[in-house]
Amino acid sequence: MHQRTCFRLSNLSWLPLVIASTVLLTPRLPALGQPSVPRADSPVSPPVSSGNIVAVPVALSPETVRVASPLADRPGARTAPPTSARQTVANAGVVVDTMRSQPHLPPAPPPDLTIRQVTIAGAGDLQAQVAAVIRTQAGQTVPAAQIDADIAAIQAIGLFADVQAIRVTTPQGVHLTYQVQPNPILRAVQMRGNQVLPQATIAAAFRDLYGRPLNLNELKPRIENLNQWYEKNGYSLGQVVNVRWGEPTGTLVVTVAEGVIDSVQVQFVDSEGNPTDANGKPIKGKTREVVITRELQTQPGTVFNRTTLTQDLQRLYSLGLFSDVGVTLKPGQQPDTVGVVIHLAEQKTGQFMPNAGYSTSGGLSVGLKLQQNNVGGNHQQLSADVQVDFPKGTLRERQGVLYDVRFTDPWIIGDTRRTGYTANVFKRRGTSLVFEGGATPVDLLNGDQPRLDRLGGGIRFSRPLADDWQVSLGTQYQRVLVQDESGRLSPQDEQGNALSFSGTGRDELYTVELAAVQDRRNQREQPTQGSLLRLSTEQSAPIGAGHILMNRVTGSYSVYLPVQFTRFTPHSEALALNVQGGTVIGDLPPYEAFALGGTDSVRGYNRGDLASSRSYVQASAEYRFPIVSIVGGTLFLDAATDLGSSDTVPGDPGGVRDKLGSGLGYGAGVRVKTPVGLVRVDYGFNDQGDSRLHFGFGDRF
C-alpha cells in the first residue's frame, strides 16, 4: 500500500500574529512553501545511505506513483490528477494505495506498520538534521500516528517548506520515504503597506537571515520584533498580517497593516456625554470645527498613534473650552483603516463680575470685570477690567477711570505656523514694591506712599518653534507718572531721592521685547517631571520724556524630578527646582528695579522687603506631595541676592530703606485645587527669625 501524509503552512501555527484585538490573516499565507513536485527534467540520483536510513534525491523513481500536494499562488506548481483508490504498477509486483479521506464514513483505525526501509529524499545538506528527529527506524512495527509525529518533528526544524511521508507496501514490509523540500535561500525582504516602520528597523530584523535557507523558527521572533516596534512607538493598530514567498525566488514578502486614519470627526455632546438633546436633535457646539481640528496631529491619511492622539486630547482640554474630551474609534471605509471620532462637551467660557467698595477716607469705587474666552467660536479671548473711583474731600483730583482691556487670538485662522497675538490698552494705578518694605520706611513729604500711574498699550506676536520652543516679539508704550494719593506729581521722596528717571515725575517708555520659552513639562499644572526655560530681553528707545535707553535681560530655569519618598500615589511626588536671575543694562528708572522678597520671591519676608536692585539671582527648591484628592503639600527653601547692585539704582530705594540685599526663607505649605484654579498657602520663616503667611494662585514656579 502507498500512502502520503502532507504538512502545510496553511494555519501558520508557527507564526501567531495576534496584535491588539484583531487578527488579519489572508488566504495567501500558505504560499510560504515551495512546490514539491519535481520537474520532468530533474535527474535521478542514487540513494545515499546513512545506517538504516537512506537519503535519496528529490526526484522519485519512475515506478513510484505519487500524488503531489497543491500549493497556493506558486507559479509553475503542479498537482497530479486524481487517481483511483487502488493502482497496480505494471511489471513491478507492487500494490500502491493512495488513501483518501471519506467524509461520510468513519475511517477504520489504521493498522500498525512493519517498516522495512526508511529513506530521506530532498534534504541535501540538511539530511543529518532530519535524521536526528525521526523516531521511526527500519525493522520496527509502529502505529501510523508515529509517522505523523515524525512529520511534525521535521516541520518543527523550521527549514522546510514541504514535508511528506510516502509509504510503499511490499510483501517484505513498508518502504517509508520522508520527502522534504527545503525553504529557499533568503535573498531579499519586500515590505508592503508600511508608512511609519523605519527601513533601519526592517534591515536590522532580517540582516542575519540572508544568504541561507530561511528558518521559520528564526523568522517568528523577527516578525514579533516588528509588531513590538509598533506597540512600543504608539502604533497600537500596526501589525504584520501576511508573510509569503514572492518573485524572484528567495524574496520574502511581508505585508503590514498599520491602521491608516481615513476620517476625523468632531461630535459635540452634553454634560452627560449624550450626542443628542431631549428632542433627539444633535448637540450643536459654539466652537468652530477648524479651531478644534487645527490642534490635532491626528489627521486623515496619517497612521493612528495612541501617544499622538493622547497629546491631541490634552491640547484640546488645555484650551479651556471643554469640560470633557473623549474619543472613539470606528472601522474605516477601506480595509485596514480606522475612523476617529472626537467627543467634546463645551463649558461656559464667559464671566461677568461686578464689584463695589467704599471707604471713609477714599470714597466709593465701582468695578466691573468681563471675560469671554471663545469670542465668535474662534478661541479668541477678550477681557476688560474697569474701575471707576469717586473719591471725596481732598482726593477728588484723583477721580477717574482705571482699565485694562486685552484681546488675544492664540492662533490666527489660516496661518500654518500657529502665529498668535495679544493687544492691550491699560490705565493702572497702584503702589510699587520698589518703594515699600525695608527696616526704614521712606515716604513722600506729605506722608503718602508713592503711587505709579501707568497709561499705555502694546501688541505682542507669538509663534511655536521646533523642540517645544515658543517665541514672542512685541512692542509697548507706557507713560508713567509718580504721584501721591491725591494724584499730584511727586518726583522725589521725603529725603530728596529721585523717584523717576527724568526727575519731573513723568517718564515715557517705548520698548521692544523678545522672549523665548521652552516647555518640556509633563503637564502644565503641578508637573512632576520635565523642565521649563524662559529667556527674555527688553530694549527701550530713548525718545519721549526721560529719553530712557535701557535693556532688561531675564532668565529662569525650572526642573521637575519625580521621586517616591513615601507610599503616596505613584508618580505624584516631585522635587521642583528653580533658578532665575536678571539685570538691567544702561538707564534704569527706579520703579523698574527688581523687588525681592515675598510670596513670589523669598517666602518668610514681606513683599519687596529684601531688596530693590539692578541685578539679582534667586533659587528655590520644593518637595511636592499629595495629601488627599484635591489637597497637596510642599516643603520649600528660597534664597536670593541683589549681587550688591542695589546702590546702583537711581535714588537707591533699597539702601535708604535699609533693605538687606540677600536672604533665606524656608517653610511648608498646602495646595488646594478649586474651581478658580490652584490656591497655595505657605507659612515661611526667614533667616532673621521672622515668619509670614503667604497666599497665591498657581504653582510657585
Image (cartoon, helix red, strand yellow):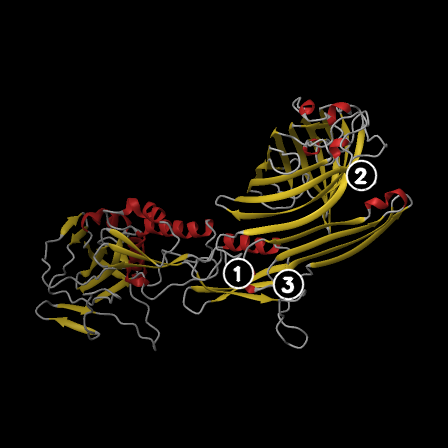
> Label 3, on which residue?
345
**How many residues crowd around disc 3 within 10 Å: few (fewer than 14), some, or many (20 or more)?**
many
Asked whether the residues under the numbered discs 1 and 3 touch, taking CB atoms below 8 Å apart as contact, a structural biologist would say no
Residue 449 placement: quadrant? top right
* Earlier residue among tags 3 and 2: 3
Viewport quadrant of the C terminus: top right
Q: Which residue is drawn at the image coordinates 90% and 44% (left, top)?
A: 393
Q: Amino acid at mark 2?
A: Arg
In this view, the residue in front, 497 or 86, is 497
Q: Is residue 243 left or right of residue 400?
A: left
**Label 3 SS:** strand
Q: CA distance from mark 3 to mark 2?
A: 52 Å
Q: Which residue is drawn at the image coordinates 62% and 31% (left, top)?
A: 582
Mark 2 or 1: in front is 2
Q: Amino acid at mark 1?
A: Thr
Q: Which residue is drawn at the image coordinates 83% and 44% (left, top)?
A: 397
Mark 1 or 3: in front is 1
Q: CA distance from mark 2 to mark 1?
A: 54 Å
In this view, the residue in front, 291 or 300, is 291
* Earlier residue among tags 2 and 1: 1
| Residue 642, x across and y down, in percent | 67, 25
| Residue 333, x across and y down, in percent | 44, 70
Q: Is residue 632 above or below residue 195?
A: above
Asked whether the residues under the numbered discs 2 and 1 touch, taking CB atoms below 8 Å apart as contact, a structural biologist would say no
Q: Identify the disc placed on residue 293.
A: 1
Residue 59 placement: quadrant? bottom left
In this view, the residue in front, 274 or 301, is 301
**Label 2 SS:** loop
Q: Amino acid at mark 3?
A: Ala
**How many residues crowd around disc 2 within 10 Å: few (fewer than 14), some, or many (20 or more)?**
some
In this view, the residue in front, 335 or 263, is 263
> Label 2, on which residue?
488
